[in-house]
Image (cartoon, grey):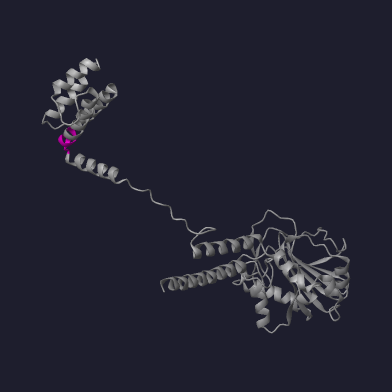
Amino acid sequence: MQDFNRLVKQYWQFVFLVIVAIVLFTIVSATGGDSKQPGSSYSIAPNGYGAWYQMMLDRGVKIQRWEQSFPQLAAVPGYEQGVTLLQVNSQIQPLQLSTTQQEWVKQGNTLIVLGVSAPAGDIPFQTDIDSPQGAIRIETTRRFKSDLIIAGLPIDQPSEAILSDRSGKVLDRFNLGKGRVEIATTPHLAANAYQDFQPNYELLAKLVTENRQRIIVDEFIHGYRNRAATSDPKTGDVLEYLARTPLIIVCLNIGLVMLVLIWQQNWRFGKIIIPKLPEIENSEAYIKALGGVLRQANSSEFAIQNIGKNQQLAWQQKLGLGSDQLVEAEAVIAAWENQIKLPTDDLRFVLSSRTQARRLNPKELNIWLNKIQAVSIQIQ
């Protein structure tokens, strides 16, 4: 029964950790995102356009996301003309219109591109520019110049400034055939971070609605793909998902799974090995314990009497005096002089200390033990 309860407890712990891992993964995925997420209407990050897109929906504006390539857009019946396409670049890049894009615009369509490269000037990074919608917050030092050549547009094509200051143009408009191209130096004109700056949202809303055309937000450039347009639905979804998934998300997932498994099972790649405790020698433990007690009590007499007695019996046996009982110290010294023929100073000191009732301090006791060791070495 105890094992069953333990298994149930581990099971619920595992379920709890899996739920925590899923929540963390969802948070990281939503806030971290892919490198193409900035500018996406799906993104709720500060550099995304989710709030502006939701504002347009709340107003009843007919706006839709487009998740196919531009050539596919130009080939769809009903999208040849009368369309406003909004593209928000994930990062600043030059405007390079393809022949297909130019022809599509000339038919009467509008192409709005936010985040087009322009020269940076020696001006404040943050400025507020007046407009009919109110003060527009701009955070960039990039401005379009009058002599700027945009790839894909005629060199001598005149432009009309939509938003500008003394340093140059932030929003510029080019007429091309029956349609027009509108470009901005900043990709963050109506990003989520600018929700407190309503004029920014209103300006972009005016740009996409003033022609009363079908409004499309390009999400294909942010990595989103229409599943119906996938050539191989069996492999396209999986491969595209893996290709769009940031490496840090994959590593985080693997790390969370490993932590869950290690914590739930409480082992590392195998069963727990409990180290065996060293076997305790009872005699050694008794001697150490007794020595500790004697040292705390400073009872050197007990040690001198017992150690001295045992050592003298051992020496008597080697000198041929017997080991049954102790003999007089002078008899041991005489046998030493006759057989060993070495100085008897250390031997006399040891034997005399045993017969004295004086307590030795730690230093004197240490000297006495050293002399015992010296005598034992000589008598071998």
Left or right of 378, for residue 353: left
Image position, residue 327 (x, y; %): 14, 26
Q: Which residue is at 55% across, 70% downward?
A: 23
Front position in the image: 268 or 241 = 268
Instruction: Say whether residue 132 is visible.
Output: no
Give the camera-side residue of 329 and 220: 329
Work out which quarter of the rendered image holds the N terminus and state it.
bottom left
Task: Tell me, yes or no, whether the highlighted magenta stretch contains residue 236.
Answer: no
Among the 4 quarters of the image, the one containing residue 234: bottom right
Instruction: Evaluate whether residue 22 shows in this view.
Output: yes
What segment is highlighted magenta in the picture? 298-304
Q: Which of the two residues, 83 or 251, is positioned nearer the viewer here?
A: 251
Left or right: where 23 falls relative to 358: right
Q: So how many labels did they put on this image?
A: 0
List x then y, in percent, for residue 91.
71, 61
Q: Residue 110 at x, y = what percent?
A: 81, 74
Q: Is residue 109 above or below residue 298?
A: below
Across and down, in percent, residue 256 comes to: 56, 63
Residue 224 higher or lower than 290, as above or below: below
Give the image quarter of residue 178.
Answer: bottom right
As drawn, the residue found furthest toward the left would be 357
Image: 144 above or below 4: above
The quadrant of the rendering that contains the C terminus is top left
Q: Residue at x 81, y 66 (%)?
A: 159
Question: Who is closer to the viewer here, 350 or 69?
Answer: 350
Name the magenta segment's main secondary structure. helix
Q: Residue at x 22, y 27 (%)?
A: 317
